Amino acid sequence: MKFIRVNTLTNEITEAAAASEYADLGGRGLTSSIISKEVHPRAYALGADNKLVLAPGLLTGTSAPCSGRLSVGAKSPLTGTIKESNVGGLAGQYLAGHGITALIFEGKPEREKCRILVISQNEIKLEDKNSLRGLGNYAVVEELQREYGSQNVILSVGPAGEMGAAVASIAGTDMEGRPSRHAGRGGLGSVLASKGIKAIVIAKPANPFVEAANARQFKESAMEFARSLNESKKALRNYGTAVLVNSVNGVGGLPTRNFSTGHNEEALHFCGERLHELCQERGGATGHPCSRGCAIRCSNVYHDEDGNYVTSGLEFETIVLLGSNCGLNNLDEIAKLDRLCDDLGIDTMEMGVTLGVTMEAGLMPFGDYTMMCEAIESVAKGTQLGKVLGQGATVTGKILGVERVPAVKGQGMSAYDPRALKGTGVTYATSTMGADHTSGNALPGRGGLDCHKPDGQVKLSQELQTMTMVCDMLGICIFVGPLPENMPVMTTLFNSFGDRQAVPEDLMAMANKILSIETRFNHAAGITQNDLPRFFRTEPLPNNNLVFDVDEEELKQINFYC
Amino acid sequence: MKFIRVNTLTNEITEAAAASEYADLGGRGLTSSIISKEVHPRAYALGADNKLVLAPGLLTGTSAPCSGRLSVGAKSPLTGTIKESNVGGLAGQYLAGHGITALIFEGKPEREKCRILVISQNEIKLEDKNSLRGLGNYAVVEELQREYGSQNVILSVGPAGEMGAAVASIAGTDMEGRPSRHAGRGGLGSVLASKGIKAIVIAKPANPFVEAANARQFKESAMEFARSLNESKKALRNYGTAVLVNSVNGVGGLPTRNFSTGHNEEALHFCGERLHELCQERGGATGHPCSRGCAIRCSNVYHDEDGNYVTSGLEFETIVLLGSNCGLNNLDEIAKLDRLCDDLGIDTMEMGVTLGVTMEAGLMPFGDYTMMCEAIESVAKGTQLGKVLGQGATVTGKILGVERVPAVKGQGMSAYDPRALKGTGVTYATSTMGADHTSGNALPGRGGLDCHKPDGQVKLSQELQTMTMVCDMLGICIFVGPLPENMPVMTTLFNSFGDRQAVPEDLMAMANKILSIETRFNHAAGITQNDLPRFFRTEPLPNNNLVFDVDEEELKQINFYC
């Protein structure tokens, strides 16, 4: 296990073996452990005392299916909590290929800087690169690929991050070298930018695959897992994550016009089937993998009417939050907003929730594409309005005097209305990350429960949060399903990779320990909110008359503090 | 005990005896008990579910010295915590004179309204008064006194409150009928305005004094207490609260240029002695009482060079936070800023801290009086910048990317740097109200401690917080001193007023129970922060090299949750 530390004040780069306490940890397990140990819970998120940690999952870089995930961790400027933002693309696999277990950015330069970190086979160095200042991610990647070669993977921060926006993402290139994969949540792009780092260039490692200790057992399990995913995930492959549009709209939980209703009658214009059709017609693609060895391939490449590339990885969350939630139902316009956010380095989800709140306040009409573009650009420009919107939905709602702000712990909600999808609502309320579906998403039918009913949702969410953490530690994409039936194969992969003897319960216990570490950090930061904004309990969804009615006392049962 | 409830949606006004659980409660004891019982901790502060409660202290309206205080309580739009803001002037005494124990505003009109509540001897009624919309407090008082007579006391909200600003105060008239006394902290002005109430007109009660049950014992104690205060508080009487300028500057804890240093070399231009001199020279006044029966009389009347009235009650906190902390050392300019804030209905303290942060961000130079006026006016106008500043220092600091934000639980700090005044620092960190000196102020020398040293400060703060609550329950001004030596006379007054047999420990126990109620409310709202912003521990004051070094674990000993 190799830790690389980049001191962004002194420019020193040091390499050291990890302390023994970090053995068997990877991904979110590692980012949260390091942040918890090395960052004060009340540190200023954009200050010298915060750190930004990149850690591939334990299996990232191996040939295990869907194991391309990279965890990015820091104290979040958006939520003030500990934060892990999880991203696909090739960065995680390349870092793992270089044997880097954790890449840790520390300190802060005394004045603003614009530098890149270049990781090649034999060297890691910081370089000033003022020519990149203020550039969008697409231009950054173009310039760096020209200079360093197109086989390099690039992580980068757009102008929103340079402005210190709490909605700023870190972009990572995909298999085609496009900055289309984003560690979006929690404003971690601004943490990296605050340390004077605009981009990280990672050379293709000499040995592309990390080898398992028990290679035969690993290969057998991996192949069997891949076969099963290949078979069971056809809908995701065909329609992308947008396959969820009809399903979530069907249960009446599709956020529409700032969560004022859960049913959008125009959903046929932006559902997975429509996305598939347009991608096929225009020479785009569905069934596109975001990283090497993906057995699901839920990504897509979206072209415009003239057949020109617009964006890649047009996801359910983006479509619903920047689209339906903002009263915008035109998929072409949504795709252009996705591209704009990707280029400027903005989390499409937080931006969508923020714009929904802004529209509710009357600053712009719902569905006004042109004004949405201007508003998004204002964040990157750092105008007065842009500085407000750049702080996300909660702060924007405070300033504009909006009561209906769908956010928890300062983070805007994902694209599932918790009144109709109550298990996900429990996760929003209790997760260490704020309103975050990737902490434990109870999709319709999950756990055999009726998502409209409160019964059993607390237990389901707790289990999902634990199993999601298992995925996040291993670097396995949660789209494989953070489900009991997948725990045995994950455990086998974990065991054969490191020649270990764990049973699934051991991995679950490790996961709960990390959740406890995250919870302690948040408590020490003074952040304990464990419920949804009040209006979800008092204002029924007009389409199905549902409120969030999971018992407040029962929510308290979810307590990872141990 | 009489509760008046004003339903601001239906316009119903009801009168009822208080439930027995509220017996022996007044002031903050009553506001916090009612809010805790009737308002959900996660209610939207400017929504229909929040309530605003006005409760005179238990002794308010009697002839006890310094007993003119009125508690105003609600869930705060600034902090999200339970909040009590405490105000002098005549409003409390008049409400008590009408036998009103608590005046409770509930609900919220469907559309914006501008109404007044008129309390006369025999009637309480709501009236539309659109002519007052957008008016400053001085104009509101002028118009209402013209219509209802100058003997009425008026509570009112300025345009900042109408804009929903979290820095909005509720103004109350003083003995001369000027809106110079403010329930400033926590944005309660915007809560009242959100309910469509611009002002409350309170007729002079037929029986001006509330009589004690044991009149002889009451009178004796009250007279003895008054004599003692008259004797011991001469400095406050002569120099106003500004007497603290030299003392706090002397211990190196006078907030200067956004808490970047604790010593201001220009303090002679705005210290109590200078204030006294100018008040004398120009026909103003010191030794001015803010309410009937004050034995201290620390207020003042400040005139300009031409002898014209500028403002009244130019206080230490205002002078330091809008002055020194903003790099402004000219007392005439500070007085005009005080008048401007009083007129627009803005908390001078939160505004001063917010402007200090704004200056640190470089939006305006330190000490620029003209830009300060414009910035303050922008809050009342609701411009884009004004909406940001109107949310106070914490939100402004987030948006402007400032690390040094002197605030706790969303509330800007009072005019004592906690690195030099460590007991007050403990109170800032642990109080249920956020960074609030009126929750327990450890002035230099208090408790026989060295305010520069951490030793004993936790215990001192805890005792001060309890004894301050005793004052706040009784309606006694904290300037009498929330000290052990004053507890016996307060207990005697409490006993003789209600024919009770309490000992001081009983009052302290009641106080701790209310602190526990407040703590529970905050915890249920997800607010538990119990420490100062990190920079107070890491960045020494340049003038004395002090940091805030009270042990973090020791701070946890302050826990009123019981």
Image (tube, coloured by chain):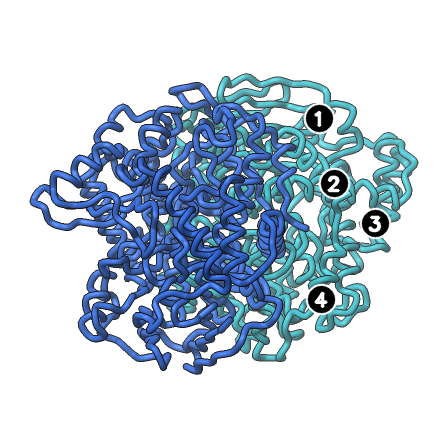
Chain colours: A cyan, B blue
Quarter of the image that includes the N terminus of chain A: top right
User: Which residue lies under the disc numbered 3?
Assistant: A225
Residue type highlighted by circle 1: Gly
User: Which residue lies under the disc numbered 2?
Assistant: A514
Q: In which quarter of the image is residue A513?
A: top right
Report, in whole angstroms, how far the alpha carbon at label 1 lies from the one at label 2.
23 Å
- The mark found on residue B195 in the picture is none
Which of the two discs, 2 and 3, sits closer to the camera? 2
Q: Earlier in the sequence, mark 2 or mark 4?
A: 2
Which residue is pictured at 54% across the width and 21% down the height?
A7
- The mark found on residue A551 in the picture is 4
Q: CB atoms at circles 3 and 4 under 8 Å apart?
A: no
Q: Which of marks 3 and 4 is nearer the N terminus?
A: 3
Which of the two discs, 2 and 4, sits closer to the camera? 4
Which residue is pictured at 60% across the width and 54% down the height?
B502
Mark 2 is surrounded, within 10 Å at the Cα level, by few (under 14), some (14 to 19) or many (20 or more) other residues, namely many
Q: CB atoms at circles 2 and 4 under 8 Å apart?
A: no
Which of the two discs, 4 and 1, sits closer to the camera? 4
Q: CB atoms at circles 1 and 3 under 8 Å apart?
A: no
Please determine if labels 1 and 3 lie on a single subunit.
yes
Quarter of the image that includes the C terminus of chain A: top right
Q: Which of B406 and A28 is in front in this view?
A: B406
Report, in whole angstroms, how far the alpha carbon at label 1 lies from the one at label 3.
25 Å
Please determine if labels 1 and 2 lie on a single subunit.
yes
Q: Mark 1 lies on which chain?
A: A
Indicate left or right for B138 with A179 as reference: left
Residue type highlighted by circle 4: Asp
Q: Which chain carries label 4?
A: A
Residue B514 coordinates in the image, percent (x, y): 58, 55
